[in-house]
Amino acid sequence: MKILLHLILIVGSYSLSTEKKEENHDGSSKVSTVLNEILNRESLVRLSMVQKMQTLMLGAVEAKQRDETLKENLENIEKELQAIRDGHEKYREENQKVQENLRNDIRQLQEIQAGAIDDLKNIYWNFSLIVNETCKSEQVQKIQSQLQSGLLKEIPGNYAFYAQLTTSTSDNDVIFEDVITNEGSAYNGNTGIFTCKYSDSYAFSWTIATSNHRYTEAELIVNDEVIGSSGTDSRSHSDTADSSTGFVVCNLKIGDKVRVAINGTADGIYSTFSGWRIGENYSSFYAKATSTLYKPFSSLHGLPFQSVVVNNGYVYDSDNGTFTCPTDGLYVFVCTFEARDGKGFPVYFHHEGSKLSAIPIQPDASSGKYADTSSTLQIFSMSRGDEIYLYPTDSDSAIQPVHSTFSGWRISSASKISAFMAYTSIDLSSSPMKYNKELLDTTSSFMSSYFQAPEDGVYLFFWHMHANDIRLESFLQVNDRTVGQTIGDATSSAYEGSSNLAILRLRKNDRVKITHDGTADEDQTMISGYLLFN
């Protein structure tokens, strides 16, 4: 019985133990299941994060590749741009070489021509000896004279003249008989004719004054061809005098003859004629307006003077009215504008859309005048590639053709050659003139009220006076001696400009000044000048 009881107890204990083990096993299984779920979720999160990181890394790699591709494209573009720059520079150098070769060819042709002339001269003299021995007829002598005139010898040198008209003259060639300067003796005060002694580029200026309600047309004639013209109008009911100044640049050959002819009356003293050799600098031009010029649409373009008579060095572009500087140096620009039909407007020299000078050129026919002209001569220091052009500020500007011109040339590549330019920004009645705005003075020779010659030489002077409601005369003086005059009457026309140009041989320390007999109006009243040669 005891054994049985022990067996029952042992079996019960085993059963209880087995049940507890089963309960423990079930608990462990649940924990394991939860842990597995957590691990599975963490793995999914990690897998998702890995996938995202891989995506980001792929994106970064692709971005880097795009950056490298873009950088490579930019480098290629830069190489192409540099190739274009190199090609442009090469073209510019080649163009310069072509121009230089052309200049050399021209010089060689001139030398060949000179040699041929010498040969022809020898042939002529031999022919002349034979003819003289056989015949003395007038016909043969005429042939000899014609041959000799065609065999004139080139005489290099500095040529410049300045002459005044002493008494009034009408409807004829004008003989400016008071010859003040005649360097090279190429101007004849008895005939009023300049005869070219050396083939080259020359500039000419003439001023014609008229009075008593007359209109005078003047022409500058080379041989029998009209190269330039100007109009002087004193027809207003109260004005008693007016003057106008014209400019031309022309290429002359030995023997060419230059003169001024008028249709109307030129008054003495105020009417003058000047000319000077520019020199072989291949950077001069002369252009005329053949139709009315209006304000350009863009301030980056100038008035396009359509007829380009002279363009040495191809420096002037008539399509956009622009002069492009070929080499560094000092340059002179001259122009004359004519207004009609009651119009008056200012025109300025411009560079890259801005005024290069505060001095306007302003013809004014707005009050009582049938026609009015205004002229200027301004000097600028320029660098190669600089552009300069004329631009009117008024929208209704209308520049008349024929008498309106634009010219320019290089003075010198040396920056220290004596040159100056000044104007007054205030009305001035005191005399002599005091120009309070100095724009240029390369040798510190201009002292507000006078110019003092820094060295012996031949100098050019241009001055412009502007009157407001008065008659105004001015006097160019050297050491208090009058050598040039202007006259302008604005009694009824409100405003009137007058100008003149003189070429004078000065000694060192000679003083040049402007005196006047009335109030000079601001801005347009100016003076400029430079050394032509020693």
Image (cartoon, rainbow, N blue to C red):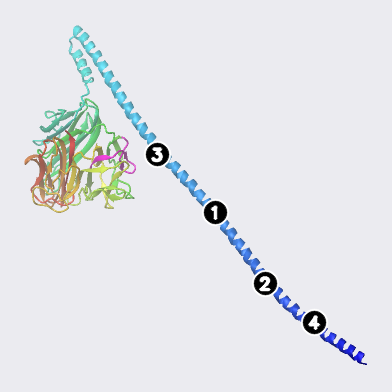
Amino acid type at image mark 4: Lys
Does 333 lie within the magenta span?
yes
Q: Which residue is mark 1?
A: 66
Tell me the SS state at disc 2. Answer: helix
Amino acid type at image mark 2: Arg
Of the pair 482 and 331, the residue shown nearer to us: 331
Which of discs 1 and 3 lies nearer the camera? The answer is: 1
Amino acid type at image mark 3: Glu
Q: Which residue is mark 2?
A: 41
Q: Position of residue 463 (x, y in %)?
A: 15, 43
Q: Residue furthest front?
A: 2
Q: Earlier in the sequence, mark 4 or mark 3?
A: 4
Q: Earlier in the sequence, mark 1 or mark 3?
A: 1
Of the pair 6 and 281, the residue shown nearer to us: 6
Q: Earlier in the sequence, mark 2 or mark 1?
A: 2
Using a 10 Å C-alpha cutoff, classify the residue at mark 2 as few (fewer than 14 neighbours), some (14 to 19) or many (20 or more). few
Q: Residue at x 45, y 41 (%)?
A: 83
